[in-house]
C-alpha cells in the first residue's frame, strides 16, 4: 500500500508540471563539496527546470535554495533540509570548521532561510533540519502545483 501511495503521489507531482517543463527531483542527497554544487545548480538555474525537493537535501545540497529562483522550487511532505557549518579536513584528518566557507554558504541562502538558521544558533558542526510545516511555510508544497494544473484550462 505504501508503494502505491508513493507512486500516486509521484504521478500527481508530475501532473503539475507542464509537458514543456522539465523537472529535477532531489531526494536522499547528503551533499558534498560546495564548489561542485555551485556549478551543478548554476547549470540547473540556466536550464529553467523546476526543482522538487522530495526527501533529504543536506549540506551542500541546500545551496539549491539560493541558486534556483524561489518560484521554481517546491517541497513535498517528505522534504527535509539539513544545514551545518562548512568544514575541511585538518592536518590530523579530522573535520575542522571553515569559517570563511561557512559564511559564504550562509550568505547563499535566501533571507527567510538565514533567519530560520539564525534562530537555531547559526551554522555549526551540529546538523539542523528544516522540514514539515516550517519548511512549507517558506516554500510552496508541490501538490498544490498538481491541483492548479489539473484545474487550469489547456494551453495556459
Image: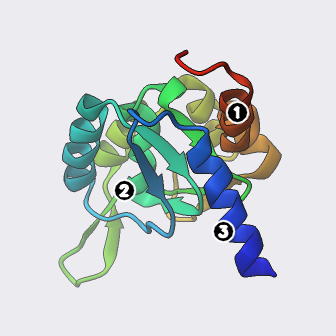
**Nearest to the observer: residue 87 or residue 49:** 49
Q: CA distance from mark 3 to mark 1?
A: 18 Å
User: Which is in the foreground here, disc 2 or disc 1?
Assistant: 1
The quarter of the displayed image where residue 152 is located: top right
The quarter of the displayed image where residue 136 is located: top right
User: Seen in the image, is 54 located left or right of residue 85?
Assistant: right
Q: Report helix, strand or loop for mark 3.
A: helix
Residue 28's disc is: none
- Report the quarter where the C terminus lies: top right
Q: Position of residue 63 (x, y in %)?
A: 39, 44
Q: Report helix, strand or loop for mark 1.
A: helix
Q: Report helix, strand or loop for mark 2.
A: loop
**Nearest to the observer: residue 30 or residue 95:** 30
User: Which is in the foreground here, disc 3 or disc 1?
Assistant: 1
For residue 79, say whether it is visible: no
Q: Position of residue 100 (x, y in %)?
A: 29, 43
Q: Counting residues from the N terminus, which is met first, the one under dot 2 or under dot 3?
A: 3
Contact between marks 2 and 1 (CB within 8 A): the answer is no
Position above or below: 133 against 124: above
**Nearest to the observer: residue 154 or residue 17:** 154
Q: Residue at x 24, y 30 (%)?
A: 46
Position above or below: 9 against 135: below
Residue 7's disc is: 3
Q: Which residue is mark 2?
A: 86
- Report the quarter where the N terminus lies: bottom right
Q: Which residue is mark 1?
A: 150
User: Seen in the image, is 108 located left or right of residue 16?
Assistant: left
Amino acid at each position: 500500500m505504501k508503494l502505491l501511495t508513493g507512486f500516486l503521489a509521484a504521478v500527481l507531482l508530475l501532473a503539475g508540471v507542464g509537458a514543456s517543463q522539465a523537472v529535477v527531483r532531489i531526494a536522499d542527497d547528503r551533499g558534498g563539496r560546495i564548489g561542485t554544487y555551485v556549478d551543478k545548480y548554476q547549470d540547473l538555474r540556466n536550464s529553467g527546470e523546476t526543482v522538487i525537493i522530495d526527501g533529504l537535501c543536506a549540506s551542500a545540497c541546500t545551496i539549491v535554495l539560493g541558486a534556483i529562483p524561489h518560484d521554481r522550487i517546491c517541497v513535498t511532505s517528505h522534504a527535509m533540509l539539513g544545514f551545518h557549518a562548512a568544514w575541511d579536513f585538518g592536518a590530523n584528518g579530522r573535520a575542522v570548521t571553515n569559517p570563511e566557507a561557512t559564511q559564504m554558504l550562509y550568505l547563499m541562502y535566501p533571507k527567510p532561510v538565514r533567519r530560520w538558521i539564525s534562530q537555531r544558533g547559526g551554522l555549526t558542526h551540529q546538523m539542523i533540519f528544516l522540514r514539515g510545516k516550517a519548511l512549507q511555510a517558506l516554500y510552496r508544497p508541490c501538490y498544490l502545483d498538481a491541483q492548479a494544473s489539473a484545474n487550469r484550462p489547456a494551453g495556459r
